Image: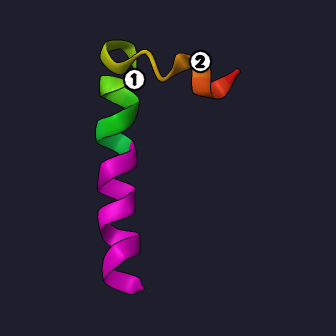
């Protein structure tokens, strides 16, 4: 679980930046 949390943190950062590209902004809504 700790390892996954570490990857989750990095994945979230990458996803936030790619949010504009993926259009995940809808997810926030």
Q: How is the image coloured?
A: rainbow
The mark found on residue 19 in the picture is: 1
- Please, what is the dominant secondary structure of the magenta stretch? helix
Q: Examine the structure image and report whether residue 24 is included in the region drawn in magenta.
A: no
Q: Is residue 16 above or below residue 7?
A: above
Screen quadrant of the N terminus: bottom left
Q: Provide residue 3's location: percent of width, then percent of height.
A: 31, 81
| Residue drawn at point x = 40 percent, y = 31 percent | 16
How many callouts does the rendering have?
2
Q: Position of residue 29 (x, y in %)?
A: 71, 20
Question: SS of the residue at dot 2?
Answer: helix
Q: Write the residue at 54% across / 18% down.
A: 25
Find out whether residue 10 is within the magenta segment.
yes
For label 1, the SS is helix
User: Would you identify the image quadrant in which residue 19 lies?
Assistant: top left
Left or right: 2 as drawn, with respect to 7: right
Image mark for residue 9: none
Relative height, residue 9 to residue 4 (above, below):
above
Tell me if residue 27 comes above or below residue 15 in the rendering.
above
Q: Residue furthest bottom?
A: 1
Q: Which residues are magenta?
A: 1-12
Residue linked to disc 2: 26
- From the image, state whether disc 2 or disc 1 is nearer to you: 2
First in residue order: circle 2 vs circle 1: 1
Q: How dense is the environment of label 1, judged by Cα within 10 Å: few (below 14), some, or many (20 and up)?
A: some
Which x, y percent locates residue 21? 30, 14
User: How many residues crowd mark 2 within 10 Å: few (<14), some (14–19), many (20+)?
Assistant: few
* Picture quadrant where residue 2 is located: bottom left
Alpha carbon separation for disc pair 2 and 1? 9 Å
Q: Is residue 27 above or below residue 1?
A: above
Labels 2 & 1 near each other (Cβ < 8 A):
no
- The residue shown at (35%, 36%) is 15
């Amino acid at each position: 679980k700790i390892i996954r949390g570490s990857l989750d943190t990095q994945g979230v950062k990458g996803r936030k930046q790619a949010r504009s590209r993926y259009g995940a902004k809808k997810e926030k809504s």
